[in-house]
Image (cartoon, rainbow, N blue to C red):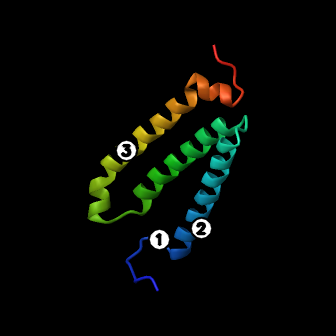
């Protein structure tokens, strides 16, 4: 049994949001792996939604001193990782793999 940790949201919120994001990322990963033409756009859409949700979730529900103190670093790491994904998806070889025209 999990220890009783102080939560700022109900436990079902954590389960449901984790399941929703897990399914979304698995679907995107499967589409990328199989080379679906729409996979890069779906990755960017899911990534942007996840980024916005993560920021909103932390700003609305996180109340611990540690979490508030590490918020800027967490945002910086998230933005940098997102930029790397965007750059990877824009590479000509990757675009050709997904059937996009490159100039």
Residue 35 vs 63, above or below: the answer is: above
Secondary element type, mark 2: helix
Foreground tag (2 vs 1): 2
| For marks 2 and 3 on the same chain, the one whose residue lies earlier in the sequence | 2
Residue 35 in which image quadrant: top right
Which label sits on residue 77? 3
Residue 9 vs 93, above or below: the answer is: below
Q: Is residue 1 left or right of residue 90?
A: left
Residue 18 position, x and y percent, is 56, 64
| For marks 1 and 3 on the same chain, the one whose residue lies earlier in the sequence | 1
Which label sits on residue 9? 1
- Which residue is labeled 2 in the image? 16
Compute the Cα span from label 1 to label 3. Answer: 24 Å
Residue 2 vs 44, above or below: the answer is: below
Secondary element type, mark 3: helix
Residue 54 position, x and y percent, is 47, 53
Foreground tag (1 vs 3): 3
Residue 90 in which image quadrant: top right
Secondary element type, mark 1: loop
Compute the Cα span from label 2 to label 1. Answer: 12 Å
Q: Quick one: 39 or 5, which is closer to the camera?
A: 39
Compute the Cα span from label 2 to label 3. Answer: 25 Å
Q: Residue at x 64, y 36 (%)?
A: 40
Few, some or many residues within 10 Å of mark 2 (<14, 14–19, 20+): few
Q: Residue at x 52, y 52 (%)?
A: 53
In the rendered image, the quadrant that contains the C terminus is top right
């Amino acid at each position: 049994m999990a220890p009783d940790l102080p939560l700022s949201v109900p436990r079902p919120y954590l389960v449901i949001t984790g399941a929703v994001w897990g399914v979304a990322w698995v679907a995107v990963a499967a589409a990328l792996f199989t080379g679906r033409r729409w996979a890069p756009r779906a990755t960017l859409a899911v990534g942007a939604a996840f980024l916005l949700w993560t920021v909103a979730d932390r700003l609305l529900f996180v109340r611990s001193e540690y979490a508030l103190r590490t918020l800027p670093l967490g945002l910086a790491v998230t933005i940098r990782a997102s930029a790397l994904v965007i750059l990877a998806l824009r590479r000509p070889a990757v675009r050709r793999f997904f059937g996009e025209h490159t100039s």
